[in-house]
Image (spheres, grey):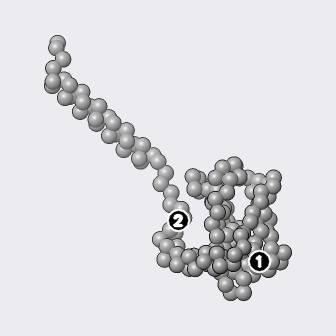
């Protein structure tokens, strides 16, 4: 039996269908996690986050952090903090996200336990209040 254009067309269509089906299966199996579950509700409050970040930039001082062993130390630009929340999330795996809430900081630094965190790229989001003024900063860190 001779290979003619009909066989080539059929073979080409079969290869194309197999390729498209494999892409559909791969797309279905891939996790498509949002940054947060309530992404759209947070989007409505995004102007507040922009204002808090502007307040942080107006301070003229950097929020610093250091990692030593199993501890993450966050050094705030101000000494006395009324309240703070520290969100440590990993963009590639939401199961590794952590949120820490601190009610009062007197010496300008806070320690957080990161013993269970595997190494990799994380995003550190720090939101804090001092005398009714909110501040926010976001930094990429490597553990």
For mark 1, does the 10 Å Cα neighbourhood hold few (<14), some (14 to 19), or many (20 or more) residues? some
What residue is at 47 percent from the left and 48 percent from the top? Answer: 30
Report x, y in % for residue 53.
61, 75
Q: Quadrant of residue 97?
A: bottom right
Q: Secondary structure at mark 1?
A: loop
> Residue drawn 28% across and 36% down?
17
Q: Residue furthest toward the top?
A: 1
Tally of numbered discs: 2
Image quarter of the N terminus: top left
Whether residue 112 is situated above or below residue 26 in the rendered picture? below
Of marks 1 and 2, which one's residue comes earlier in the chain? 2
Q: Residue at x 36, y 44 (%)?
A: 24
In the rendered image, the residue lying farthest to the right is: 107
How far across and down, in percent of the image, does residue 31 sit? 49, 51
Left or right: residue 22 compared with residue 8: right
- Residue 134 position within the rendered picture, expressed as x and y whole percent measured from the top left: 65, 81
Residue 78: mark in rendering: 1
Q: Is residue 104 visible?
A: no
Quarter of the image for residue 80 reads bottom right
Residue 32 seen by the camera: yes
Q: Residue furthest bottom?
A: 132
Residue at image x 84%, y 75%? 107
Q: Foreground: 79 or 30?
A: 79
Viewed as shown, does residue 125 lie left or right of 102? Answer: left
Judging by the rendered image, the residue that carries numbered circle 2 is 37
Q: CA distance from mark 1 to mark 2?
A: 32 Å
Q: Would you say 28 lies left or right of 58 here?
A: left
**Which mark's residue is nearer the viewer, 1 or 2?**
1
Q: Residue 128's x, y, as percent? A: 69, 76
Instruction: Name the image quarter holding residue 70.
Output: bottom right
Q: Residues within 10 Å of mark 2 (few under 14, many from 20)?
A: few
């Amino acid at each position: 039996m001779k290979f003619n254009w009909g066989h080539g067309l059929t073979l080409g269509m079969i290869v194309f269908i197999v390729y498209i089906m494999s892409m559909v299966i791969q797309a279905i199996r891939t996790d498509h996690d949002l940054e947060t579950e309530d992404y759209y509700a947070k989007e409505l409050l995004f102007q507040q986050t922009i204002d808090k970040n502007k307040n942080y930039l107006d301070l003229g001082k950097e929020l610093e952090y250091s990692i030593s062993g199993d501890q993450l130390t966050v050094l705030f630009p101000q000494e006395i903090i009324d309240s703070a929340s520290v969100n440590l999330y990993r963009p590639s795996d939401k199961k590794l996200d952590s949120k820490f809430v601190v009610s009062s900081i007197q010496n300008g630094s806070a320690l957080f336990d990161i013993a269970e965190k595997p190494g990799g790229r994380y995003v550190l989001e720090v939101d804090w209040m001092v005398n009714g003024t909110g501040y926010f900063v976001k930094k990429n860190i490597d553990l």
